[in-house]
Amino acid sequence: MIILLFKTNLACSHDVDRVTQDLNQLTGKNNWSVDIGDEDKVLRILVNTDVTNEIFHLLNKNGYTCEPLK
């Protein structure tokens, strides 16, 4: 399994709700989380393959941004 970490601008639970269905479809339910309390609003994803490009597209189409964290 791969853990992907992204800095996002998902600032509140409403923002997370807007991307939940798409993230569940892409990664599977319970395979991702967003820490909106962290200053980087970290999106953590557990997947079998690298879906970084898909995450960029998914967030962008919903009006949000992200960048990988090392």
Image: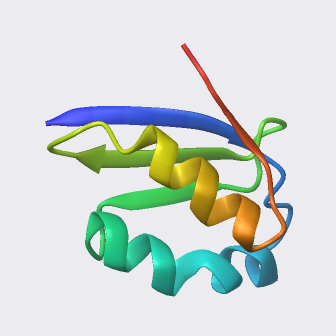
- Looking at the rendered image, the quarter that the N terminus falls into is top left
**Residue at 86% in and 61% down:** 11
Q: Quadrant of residue 58?
A: bottom right
- Looking at the rendered image, the quarter that the C terminus falls into is top right
> In the drawing, does residue 46 fall left or right of residue 18?
left
Q: Residue furthest top?
A: 70
Q: Give whichever of 8, 35 is nearer the camera.
A: 8
Spot occupied by residue 48 in the image (x, y as percentages of width and height)? 14, 44
> In the drawing, does residue 57 fall left or right of residue 3?
right
Q: Reply above or below: 20 against 70.
A: below
**Residue at 48% in and 79% down:** 22
**Residue at 49% in and 43% down:** 53
> In the drawing, does residue 64 fall left or right of residue 48?
right
Q: Give whichever of 25, 33 is nearer the camera.
A: 25
Spot occupied by residue 37 in the image (x, y as percentages of width and height)? 77, 51
For the image, the number of numbered tags is 0
Q: Reply above or below: 5 against 62.
A: above
> In the drawing, does residue 8 fall left or right of residue 3?
right
Spot occupied by residue 59 in the image (x, y as percentages of width and height)? 67, 61
**Residue at 30% in and 36% down:** 50
Spot occupied by residue 62 in the image (x, y as percentages of width and height)? 75, 74
Q: How is the image coloured?
A: rainbow
